[in-house]
Each structure stands twice: as C-alpha cells, then as structure tokens.
Amino acid sequence: MRRLATSDPGFEAAFRALLDLARDTTARVDAAVAEIIAAVRAGGDAALLDLTARFDGAAPADAAGLRVTEAEIAAATAGIAPDLLAALDLAATRIERFHAAQMPRDLTMPDPAGLTLGMRWTALDAVGLYVPGGKAAYPSSVLMNALPARVAGVARIAICVPAPGGQLNPLVLAAARRAGVDEIYRIGGAQAVAALAFGTASIAPVDRIVGPGNAYVAEAKRQVFGQVGIDSIAGPSEVVVLADAANDPRHVAMDLLAQAEHDESAQSILITDDPGFADAVARAVEAALCDLPRRAIAGESWRRNGAVILVRDWAEAVALTNRLAPEHLQIMLPDPAAVFGQVRHAGAAFLGRWCPEALGDYVAGPNHVLPTGRTARFASGLSVFDFLKRTTWVEASEAGLAAIGPVAVALAGAEGLDAHGRSVALRLPGAPP
C-alpha cells in the first residue's frame, strides 16, 4: 500500500497519482458487449439461452425456464434458517422505513399573475434490477434496489441474476420475496441488460435498469442508456477512514479490509494525524489477512490500491476527502458531526467509532448503492427519486394569459419563432378575429 504525508515535498504529485490510479484494470469490453446486445435484439430468447449456456455453464431447456417459478422461490425460502430470515426481515423493515421518509410531496403554487403552477411526482411503470452473482451473492443488493422501487410505487419490478452452473443463491430469492418481487430471471451479464432494455418474447422491456455488476454489465448499461434510464456506471468499491490514535487499530484495519475484500480493484484509504497509529493499523491489516477467507482478494486490493495518508491537522484531512469524493466515508473522531459538516463530497458517511460502514451495507437503512470513482462530486446514492419522475404543470385563466402573454410574444419574436408568438397573441385581448 502507498504511504503519503502532507508534510512531504512531493505529496501533491503523489496524491494526484493516487487520484488518477486506474483501478478498473479490466480490458475494454465495449465491442464484445455490443455484439451481445445485438445478438439479443436479433435472436431474443434463443440468444439468451445460448449466451446463458456459454457464460454461466448451464441454461434452461427452453425460454420458459428462464423465469424462476414461485415454487422455486418458496422452496428456497423454506430452506433458510429462521434467524437468517428474521435478519433479512429486520434489514428490509429498516430500509423501507428510511426510504418511505424520502417520498416527496406534489407542489401546487398560485402566483400573483393569476396562474397556478405545479409539479407532480409519478412512479416509473417498470424497472429492472441487476443482482450480481459472480464472486459473491448479494441478497442485500436485492433489498437495496427493490425496496426503494416498491416504496416509490413502481408497478412492475423484474430481477435478473446470474445462475452459475444453474444454481441460484436461496437467500437472494428470499430477499426478492421479502421485497415483494416475484418476476425473477436466471440471466446475467450484458445479455440480461439487453433483455431488460429491449425485451424478448418472454421478457417485457423496462423503463430503467439499476444495480451493480461486472465490467460487462457496466458497459451494457452504458450502451443501452437512452433506450432506458440507468442509475449509474458502478465502479470498484472504496472507503476513506478518518481516524485518530484513540481508536483500536484492529477496528480500523477491519473497516479497511471490509472494502478490500469486495474485489482486487477496491480501494481503502486511512487518513490519520498520528504516524504510530498508522503503523499499528498497517500491522493490524497484515495480521487480519492471515485468517480472512477472502485474503487473496483483500490482500491484492490493499497492496495495489490501499493507502495511508498522514496529515498535520483535520482541516487537511477534510480537504483531501473532498478531493477523493469517496463512496464511503468513516469519521472516527471525537466530534464526527463537526468534521462531517465540512465534507462536501461523499456518497455516504458513517459517524463515530461505533458505526462501521458495514452496518450501512446491510441494516442501517440508507441505501448502499452509492457513487464510486469520485462521482460523489456530482452524484448521489440510490433512493426513491431514482424510481420517480417529475411532471410540471401550468393552468392559466384568461386574465393570467393577458398578464404575462405579451412577454412571451416579445421573447418569441426575439428568437424568430413566429408560430410561438402567434399562438399566444391570438388569445390576448384585442386580438384580430
């Protein structure tokens, strides 16, 4: 891992190199994804079956088998330990409650000119959720994607999840059931995105696709944008931890590794003001890697992308954090709220030494689908707003038109749009018959 200090003469160049680090080292897949999308558009269900067999190692006998049956969902749920189902339910309840509190109100505003202006929120008709199923299974992603859509009022929610070797994770199916989703397809990769975007004989198209995936999924979402909406192009996971020497180095080490174990391209950064504490955390990371089941992935991530940054004060730490614009930010300081008040760019923040980021991944309530790759400078995490759209409306009386119509006529004339101006002028008092 890199070690930087703001007091070093070469710090700025080293920090810029950290910002510019190309963490997504996957070869370009745009051409391959374009071929997959074209195949699905041309071949429909037959192409889906062929691609599923090729990439997942197994495929149903026919298109009807692409959809997971209610009996399969029920059987999967029945086989899960009651305490795990209870945990899933508690997480879902907390996620639902937080997202329900986000729901906006319609706006109606009479104005002095005599018009009434408004804005109405409506849910999307149909959304597609992509749930990863490669290096790990993510029932938590089902809840985080499906529940905001359900709370927003989306009528149809379809899930695509890869089934390597024909196998589906039972807890993923149980999470879908808890979220009220029964339209589930055993399809992964770019072909799943193509099916959701353009539809096939057995899968109706949707209006928006959300959810993380590998490089093929990300590129497919990029290519179908415009045909459908998307949430974002998700990159490798990342965390920045601000911590002083009053913390337990083991706690901080595990917080860093919690992101590193996602994949080799993930990034974990510690910012501290104490050199001895930095050394202690680095040693704790190496010790924890010894018995971590995903130590190969986490170790590679830490060595390739991890960093420890020594600062002279916490004002420097905040400034660096805003430049990093991390997906996750942990503030493990005596007054975390005060420090957080100075942070402008972070996907989600976790305040205090008793609030590890992993709590937010599962059960805290806010969404764990967050902007990566410094896009927190301009983007936000998934919410009910991703499943709603706004429609503004105007109602004008004859008097209201008379009050502001001449301005519209003048501006239309200045722009050379005569039909615009005449459509208003013909309605004004004194207009020729």
Image: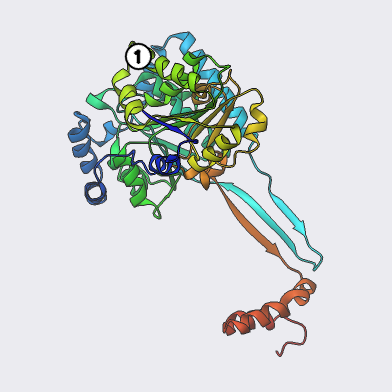
Q: Position of residue 21 (x, y in %)?
A: 36, 41
| Quarter occupied by the N terminus | top left
Which of the two residues, 187 or 412, is positioned nearer the viewer here? 412
Q: Left or right of 111: which side holds 335?
A: left
Can I make out residue 413 in this image?
Answer: yes
**Residue indicated by mark 1:** 292
Which of the two residues, 3 or 396, is positioned nearer the viewer here? 3
| Residue positioned 73% across, 87% down in the render | 431
| Residue positioned 56% across, 40% down in the render | 319
Q: Position of residue 209 (x, y in %)?
A: 42, 43
Query: What amino acid type is highlighted by mark number 1?
Result: Leu
Q: Is residue 246 above or below residue 118?
A: above
Q: Is residue 372 above or below residue 406?
A: above
| Residue positioned 59% across, 85% down in the render | 418
Q: Position of residue 321 (x, y in %)?
A: 53, 37
User: Dot 1 surroundings within 10 Å: few (below 14), some, or many (20 or more)?
Assistant: some
Which of the two residues, 143 or 200, is positioned nearer the viewer here? 143
